[in-house]
Amino acid sequence: MKIILFRFEKEKINFIECDIDSGNLIIGNKDNMPLESAESRGEKYNKVLDEFLHLWTKYPNSIFAYQAPQRYMGAIKDVEGFANASMLHLFCYQNSIDILELTSVSVREKLSIPNKDFKTLLEKEKISVCEKYKIAKSDKILDGLVSLSLLSETF
């Protein structure tokens, strides 16, 4: 199963192509799309949609996954990330593409693990992913890869 994992930032979209085969996570191409050059929000959002289309053309029949923007006390911390995630949902809906939203809560619920045990498992898996795939702890896409790694047995 091919998965394209996204991590949205204010002026950049990070993405990585992954395969899950027999419960094993296999990392492929990793890249990002800078959005600083866009002169307006409309141009930026058009660029984002063009990139989604390009990736869908390059990796047909894949699932799109993303790390959901952070929310605190009902407020959205990352407005641009939220807008990009919303566009991803719309793009996937319009093109009948499966989408996977990765949050700590959704991953924990899918694994049916109590919160305390999940936090311990998450830290162990983060160390494992960093070592196995040579991903820096500061890499923006790391949390999504850790979630996918934890869920790889469920696909």
Image (cartoon, helix red, strand yellow):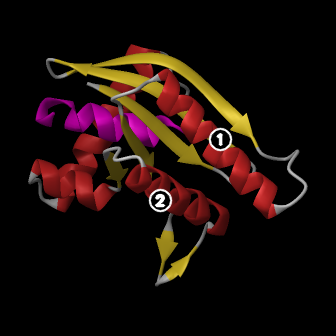
Highlighted range, magenta: 139-155
> Does residue 138 appear anywhere in the picture?
no
Relative to residue 1, is residue 49 drawn left or right?
A: right
Q: Is residue 4 magenta?
A: no
Q: Which one is in front, 135 or 38?
A: 38
Residue occupying image coordinates x 41% and y 46% = 95
Residue occupying image coordinates x 78% and y 45% = 35
Q: Main secondary structure of the magenta part?
A: helix
Residue occupying image coordinates x 21% and y 38% = 151
Q: Position of residue 141 (x, y in %)?
A: 52, 37
Quickly name the residue at label 2.
90
**Sooner in the amino-acid sequence: mark 2 or mark 1:** 1
Quickly name the residue at label 1.
50
User: Mark 2 belongs to which amino acid?
Assistant: Leu
Relative to residue 154, is residue 101 drawn left or right?
A: right
Q: Position of residue 100 (x, y in %)?
A: 32, 48
Q: Position of residue 25 (x, y in %)?
A: 29, 21
Q: What is the distance, in whole Å, between disc 2 and disc 1 at their CAs?
A: 13 Å
Relative to residue 124, is residue 140 drawn left or right?
A: right
Q: Around disc 2, counting alpha carbons within 10 Å, would you say few (fewer than 14), some (14 to 19), or many (20 or more)?
A: some
Relative to residue 34, is residue 89 drawn left or right?
A: left
Relative to 27, say whether 68 is above or below: below
